[in-house]
Amino acid sequence: PHLKASTSLSFSLSLQAKMSRPVQARRLEGIDKNIWVELVKLAATYSKVNLGQGFPDFPAPAFLTEAFTRALGGGNHMLHQYTRAFGHPPLVKVLAQFFEKLLGRDVDPMTNVMVTVGAYQALFCCFQALVDEGDEVIIIEPFFDCYEPMVKMAGGTPVFVPLRPNPPKDGKLMSSADWQLDPAELASKFSERTKAIVLNSPNNPLGKVFSRGELGLIAELCVKHDVLCISDEVYEWLVYDGKQHIRIASLQGMWDRTVIVGSAGKTFSATGWKVGWVVGPDRLLQHLRTVHQNSVYHCATIAQEAVAQGFQRELMLYGKPESYFVQLPKELQQKRDWLVQRLDSVGMKPIIPEGTYFLVADISQFKSDVPDVPNSDEPYDHRFIKWMVKNKGLAAIPLSAFYSKAHKNNYTNFIRFCFAKEEATLKAANDILQKWKQEKTSS
Ligand code: PMP
């Protein structure tokens, strides 16, 4: 009230002037646009049936939700407080026991395991802790999209190497196993600048489960060039047709250079809980602990307690028919087979996935409904998805969203469906596709 008008005017001008300073940190340059934001919003606005984002719409198993309820109201009020930063002791202990079994080696709960806020934060810790300015990180395409921005935020340079499709000659449907690395091309990406390779098996979006031979090739190159391996194995239990998920950390020379990333969200069909973990040697994990300690500190105690109980149950039932890790893939395989058959019947040729929640399908026969716009920046499959969501009410994800900018336009004839859905959801999707097909044939 004591300021004269002119003084207060110049005061407010100077306040405004200060706001012209750039606010965005340089590390965010080029990664601020994200196609997922648009696709998720589009699906929420228009879709009647959503086979887009990767999460189940069926309930998590009762033993898990009951464990959560017990943890919440069971009288141990300390479960509402902070727990150990690097993982709630019961959870790291049971994870260590489980991974000892899976890897056939000693795993120390305190130094070889860390609990994270979902696999997302596990990945973030890996890149922040292990990648320096100027380091190269090899990423196999198509890839879970956050790898690229996470490498860049750490100051690293992503180097892409594609899985190349080799369609079977006998006219059979393609399988995710038909998408393979070219060994010479892969080897050519390794150099003294390479710090790490990201491996995702079973792979999102293709559902490819890397074979022992393919993993052996990657392992050999990692050892030869002293390269680390960030092994995203969130779909480790979702492997079909009796195939085996092989952990690259169990191959010769790999334990000491591998961080295994896992997710309770995918493992127990509870993606909203955001409990994940890393398993690996202390020489790597000690640096991940520094990032974790100084960023999120730890993830919800009650969720960790419930996941620990889930794993204790699974440890007891390991390999038995009642095990969730035996039942879930069985159920999902049936859903996969059903959707494969339905997609094939309308001519949206599916690539049969060997694992994961996902199935990629070829949209070539549906292209006449959604004309291309030549010289557009937008990949064709993006436009196709937008059209399909708006006009048919069915949401899926364009495959090009899983490719780097330079390679996006080589893969625009495919879309990804998530089949970890209730029967009713899958049937509703099928109804839309069958009707669409009929309209096409009658027009
Ligand atoms: N890695 C891959 C390959 C994924 O598909 C996902 C989830 N879509 C994650 C990591 C992230 O897992 P979480 O939900 O546990 O953070």
Image (tube, helix red, strand yellow):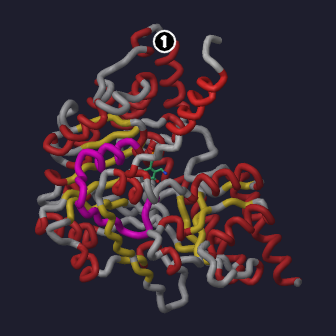
Residue pictured at 14% horizontal, 51% vertical: 256
Q: Which residues are magenta?
A: 121-145
Looking at the picture, how far across and down is residue 189, in whole percent? 25, 74
Q: Nearer the viewer, residue 188 or 253?
A: 188
* Crowding near the residue tagged with mark 1, few <14, some 14–19, many ≥20 C-alpha atoms within 10 Å: few
Residue pictured at 65% horizontal, 77% vertical: 363
Examine the rendered structure and indicate whether residue 31 appears above or below residue 286.
Answer: below
Regarding residue 387, the answer to whether it shows in the image is: yes
Looking at the picture, how far across and down is residue 74, in whole percent? 48, 12
Residue position marked by numbered label 1 in the rendering: 74
Screen quadrant of the N terminus? top right
Screen quadrant of the C terminus? bottom right
Q: Quadrant of residue 8?
A: top right
Query: Residue farthest to the bottom?
Result: 169
Label 1 SS: loop
Q: Nearer the viewer, residue 113 or 120?
A: 120
Amino acid found under the numbered disc labelled 1: Gly
Q: Quadrant of residue 386?
A: bottom right
Looking at the picture, how far across and down is residue 124, in whole percent? 35, 46
Residue pictured at 48% horizontal, 24% vertical: 67
